[in-house]
Image: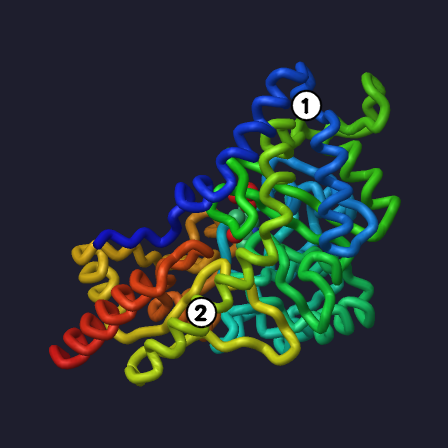
C-alpha cells in the first residue's frame, strides 16, 4: 500500500461538485481579478478568524513580505525569528533588506523559545516573527509582552496554522499582522498559489491593500513601489468552497494525531509531538523524533510511505544567509532537532488502516535500525 504524506485528490473528490461549479461561475462571469469572490472571501475569513481586516494576496510569502513593508521595516533593521521553518519566513526579511536574527527553538514544540527572545534584542530590532510551526501555536503571551515592553511589532507566520488557537484566540490574529498561505498542501489549500494578511489595524490594512496593487490605493495613482500580488478570482472561489470545512478537517487531523500517539505509545524510541497548554494545534504536520532518522526515512520510502523531513537544513546554515556569518553550533536545539524530525502522512481523509500501516512500518524500521547500532 502506497501512503503519501498528503493526498490532495481525496480532499478534492469530497468537494468536487461545488468547486467545479464555483470555478465555472467565475469563468462565465468575465471578472477574474479583484472581483466579488475576493471581497467575500476576505469578509468570510474575517468572520472565521474574528478579526477586522483581511487582504487576499498571491502567496504566504507575499503576506510576510508586505507585512514587513507595511511596517516600514527595511535596510538596517533586524527582525527576530526562528531558523526552524520554511525559507519563506527569513526570505521575506531579506526581500525588504533587513537582517534575520535567529533565536533557538524549544525542543518540545519546535517553535521559537520565547524565553530566549529578549537576549537577542538590539537597538536595531524592529519586529518578531513567530512561526506556528506544524500548526502548533507559539507562546504568544510571552512574545506579545516582550514586544510591548521593547516597542516591537509582531508578525505571525500562521501559514501552517489556520484554525489553530492560543487561549481561545485564532492564530494570526494576536500580533499586529497575521500571515496565511493557501498553497495546495496547507490545511486550507487552493488549486494554485494564494495567501492572506490579516490585521485589526485600519492603517496597516490600507498600506497592504495599496502595496499588493502597485503601491496605490487609487487606480493609476502610485505613492510607493508596490507589487502585483492579487489573489485570482478562481482561487478565491475555490477557497470560499473549502473554508466552511476547515474546522471539521482540522478536527479530523487532531483525531488522527491522537491515534498516531496511541499507536506509538508502545515504542519508546519514537517521541510523539507535544501540545502547549491552552492551545488548539491543527497538525499541519504530525512530526515525530526518532533515532537513525535518515536511514529510517529511506526504509519508509522503500515501503511506499511518504514521510518527509521539515526541514533538512536550518535557515541559519543556508547559503542564502552566508553573508551574515551564522555559525554551526549557535542554535543547539534547532540543529539537534533538524537531525531527528520526521513528518508522517497526515491529512483529514487518511484512514485508520493507513495510519496503522504507517505506525507498524515506522516502529519496525526504528527497531531494526536501533538493533543494528
Ligand atoms: C508555506 C509557508 C510559507 C509560504 O507560503 P507560500 O504561500 O508558499 O508563499 C511561509 N511560511 C511557512 C511557515 C510556510 O509553511
x 33%, y 76%: residue: 263
Q: Is residue 240 above or below residue 79?
A: above
Residue 223 appears at what percent x and percent y? 83, 27
- Per the model, the C-alpha gap separating discs 2 and 1 is 38 Å
Q: Nearer the viewer, mark 2 or mark 1?
A: 2
Q: Nearer the viewer, residue 271 or 92?
A: 271
Q: Please state which of residues 251 and 228 is positioned toward the viewer in this rendering.
A: 251
**Residue 164 vs residue 101, the one in the foreground:** 164
Q: In the rendered image, which quarter contains the N terminus? A: bottom left
What residue lies at 79% left-to-right and 32% top-to-bottom?
210
Position of residue 329 measured from the top left corner of the image (x, y, whole percent): 42, 71
- Camera-nearest residue between 182 and 105: 182
| SS category of the residue bearing label 1 | loop
Q: Quadrant of the C terminus?
A: bottom left
Q: Is 1 left, or right, of 142 in this rendering?
A: left
Q: Is residue 294 visible?
A: yes
Residue 105, above or below 13:
below
Q: Height in image: 263 above or below 327?
A: below
Q: Which mark is residue 319?
A: none
Label 1, on which residue? 33
Q: Earlier in the sequence, mark 2 or mark 1?
A: 1
Q: Residues within 10 Å of mark 1 (few under 14, many from 20)?
A: some
The quadrant where residue 123 appears: bottom right
The residue wearing badge 2 is: 257
Amino acid at each position: 500500500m502506497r501512503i503519501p504524506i498528503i493526498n490532495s485528490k481525496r480532499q478534492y473528490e469530497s468537494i468536487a461538485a461545488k468547486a467545479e461549479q464555483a470555478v465555472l461561475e467565475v469563468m462565465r462571469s468575465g471578472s477574474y481579478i479583484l472581483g466579488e469572490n475576493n471581497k467575500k472571501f476576505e469578509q468570510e475569513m474575517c468572520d472565521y478568524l474574528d478579526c477586522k481586516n483581511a487582504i487576499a494576496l498571491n502567496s504566504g510569502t507575499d503576506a510576510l513580505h508586505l507585512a514587513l513593508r507595511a511596517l516600514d521595516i527595511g535596510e538596517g533593521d533586524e527582525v527576530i525569528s526562528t531558523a526552524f521553518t520554511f525559507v519563506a519566513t527569513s526570505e521575506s526579511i531579506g526581500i525588504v533588506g533587513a537582517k534575520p536574527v535567529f533565536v533557538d527553538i524549544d525542543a518540545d514544540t519546535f517553535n521559537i523559545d520565547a524565553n530566549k527572545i529578549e537576549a537577542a534584542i538590539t537597538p536595531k530590532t524592529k519586529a518578531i516573527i513567530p512561526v506556528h510551526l506544524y500548526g502548533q501555536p507559539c507562546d504568544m503571551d510571552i512574545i506579545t509582552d516582550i514586544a510591548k515592553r521593547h516597542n516591537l511589532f509582531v508578525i505571525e507566520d500562521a501559514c501552517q496554522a489556520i484554525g489553530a488557537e492560543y487561549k481561545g484566540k485564532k492564530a494570526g490574529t494576536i500580533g499586529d499582522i497575521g500571515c496565511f498561505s493557501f498553497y495546495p498542501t496547507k490545511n486550507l489549500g487552493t488549486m494554485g498559489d494564494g495567501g492572506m494578511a490579516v490585521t485589526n489595524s485600519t492603517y496597516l490594512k490600507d498600506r497592504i491593500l495599496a502595496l499588493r496593487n502597485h503601491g496605490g490605493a487609487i487606480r493609476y495613482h502610485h505613492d510607493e513601489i508596490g507589487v502585483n500580488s492579487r489573489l485570482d478570482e478562481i482561487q478565491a472561489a475555490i477557497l470560499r468552497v473549502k473554508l466552511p470545512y476547515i474546522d471539521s478537517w482540522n478536527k479530523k487531523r487532531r483525531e488522527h494525531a491522537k491515534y498516531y500517539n496511541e499507536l506509538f505509545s508502545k515504542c519508546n524510541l519514537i517521541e510523539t509531538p507535544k501540545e502547549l497548554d491552552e492551545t488548539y494545534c491543527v497538525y499541519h504536520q504530525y512530526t515525530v523524533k526518532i533515532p537513525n532518522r535518515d536511514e529510517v526515512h529511506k526504509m519508509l520510502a522503500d515501503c511506499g510511505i511518504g514521510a518527509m523531513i521539515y526541514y533538512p537544513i536550518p535557515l541559519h546554515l543556508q547559503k542564502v544567509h552566508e553573508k551574515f556569518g551564522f555559525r554551526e553550533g549557535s542554535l543547539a536545539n534547532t540543529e539537534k532537532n533538524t537531525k531527528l524530525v520526521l513528518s508522517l502522512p497526515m491529512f483529514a481523509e487518511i484512514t485508520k488502516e493507513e495510519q496503522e500501516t504507517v505506525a507498524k512500518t515506522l516502529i519496525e524500521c526504528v527497531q531494526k535500525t536501533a538493533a543494528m547500532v
